[in-house]
Image (tube, rainbow, N blue to C red):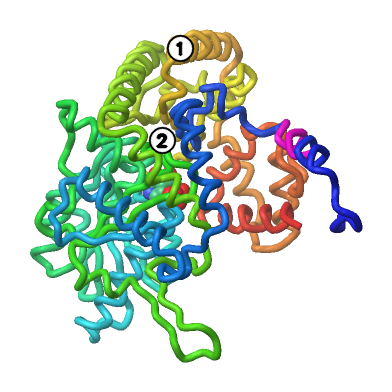
Amino acid sequence: MKIPEKGMPKEDIFKILQDYKGNDLDWQSGKVLGFIYDAGKKVHEVTHAAYTLYLTENALDPLSFPSLLRLENEVVRMTANLLDCSSDVVGNFTSGGTESLILAVKTARDYSRAVKPHIKEPEMVLPITAHSSLLKACHYLGIKPVRTRVHNESFKADVGAMRAALTDNTILLVGSAPGYAHGVVDPITEIAALAKEKDLLCHVDACVGGIHLSYMRKLGYDVPDFNLNIPGVTSLSVDLHKYGYAPKGASIVLHKNKELRKYQIWGCSRWTGYPVINAAITSAKSGGPMAAAWAVLNYMGDEGYMEIVKEVMAATQLMIDGVSRIDGLRVLGKPDMCMFALASTTDKINVYRLAEEMKKTGWYLQPQFARENSPANLHISLNRSTVPRARAFLKDFDSTVEEIKKRDADPQTRDLQEELKKLSLKYDDETFLKLAEMAGVTGTEPPQSMEKVNMLLEALPYDVSEYVLVEYLNNMMK
Ligand SMILES: Cc1ncc(COP(=O)(O)O)c(C=O)c1O
């Protein structure tokens, strides 16, 4: 594939792009129960227009594009006020939850370097349910992640285990509001109190929950505390491109005060080019996501968000009640908002097969592996576009489960574990190809079915399955 010698007509370009999209998940169907946060056509029109208005403006230099500084400050203030933050709280716009988390961890690392220089090998204590991006942050920033158990029934962080995991090298504690996998909020007040007692920093990952939970609280739902005004919490991340319904590329990282935030900012004047100051990781970036986020907050207003949250919570309850009635399945923990995880209680139902069967009826549910005390499960996140489909989901789900139950018992991950014991697993091409064959995939193309792939990845030791994931992407991407 080469850049064409002569440019193509606009019409041809859009025809090709539409064709390319043919195999993508149909996010407008309301049947995609993960990845997508869609508030409907009217909101989309507003964000689309605001995004394109700022498509080319570069947020690299707030002096050249002062309107972007203004938009960023206004988006940060609106978000901080929604979260009941004091006026000392400061924050920045980032490209997403991952960037916000990396920045929060970097801030903690550089703060500790400054005030606790004796710590040479910093550690961060986090529950096993904390988002993988926090592990990525540790990996990028040279911090040791110390992962702690969660309670068996609630899937909330075990603060006793966090306390036991502290060492002289600990710099940061983390809790989630909520953890993505099960949709349950950690005991943030207790985690923060532990951080305060031990003079540590404490980050709340409210990437997925910050906006939705705040509106639930305004509506009178019983919402566990998770805000920055809890004594001991020092930073918080909240994504606007999730339940703020902004287009992708919009998150906020907040710090208790400017004193802490200064460890986030990067300045450079020693190279041969222009002087650089970056609050976030990226340098040049489109003003589009910022403008679209500003637009959606103003377009929706509190009333608009509350209306959506009310509808989404009613649909969530309907779906949780519906699936809880099905023999052979259970909801894990007690979800605090509009996302939950469903596990099987019988060998008759393998959740990975269930996900594949549901895919045939147009529904996308997200498989999640059995890890520590969390069994294999399917994750469901609702958003506004799911609301009118909740009953249709239950109908399709019920009949799919019934069909599956009529068959012989499903294959189980433990059968694969037996097969794997016979292999000597190494980090090499031979192992990769052998595993790909076991999973019935080529290793270079997207798999037709994920059932066996998921079982295999689940059955492998963590480091081998992560090796396989990396190899796979490395093969698939040109
Ligand atoms: C709790 C939580 N934190 C962080 C992230 C990462 O966010 P992003 O995918 O925007 O980088 C997610 C994504 O789902 C999340 O649910």
Say which residue appears at 60% left-offset and 15% top-offset: 408
* Quadrant in the rendering for residue 117: bottom left
Say which residue appears at 52% left-offset and 18% top-offset: 348
Query: Is there a contact, CB below 8 Å, between mark 2 and mark 1?
Result: no
Where is residue 475? Give x, y as percent: 73, 56
Examine the rendering and report whether any part of residue 352 can be seen: yes
In the rendered view, tell whether residue 327 sits above or below residue 274. Answer: above
Q: Name the residue under label 2.
A: 375
Relative to 304, is 163 on the left or the right?
left
Where is residue 81? Give x, y as percent: 20, 47
Magenta part of the chain? 16-22
In this view, the residue in front, 363 or 467, is 363
Examine the rendering and report whether any part of residue 173 can be seen: no
Q: What element carries label 1?
A: helix
Q: Mark 1 points at which residue?
A: 394
Quadrant that contains the N terminus: bottom right
- Residue 124 on the magenta span: no
Relative to 419, is 304 on the left or the right?
left
Where is residue 412? Give x, y as percent: 55, 31
Q: How crowded is mark 1: few (under 14 residues within 10 Å), some or many (20 or more)?
A: some
Which residue appears farthest toward the right when viewing the image? Answer: 5
Q: Residues within 10 Å of mark 2 (few under 14, many from 20)?
A: some
Q: Disc 2 and disc 1: Cα gap in Å?
A: 22 Å
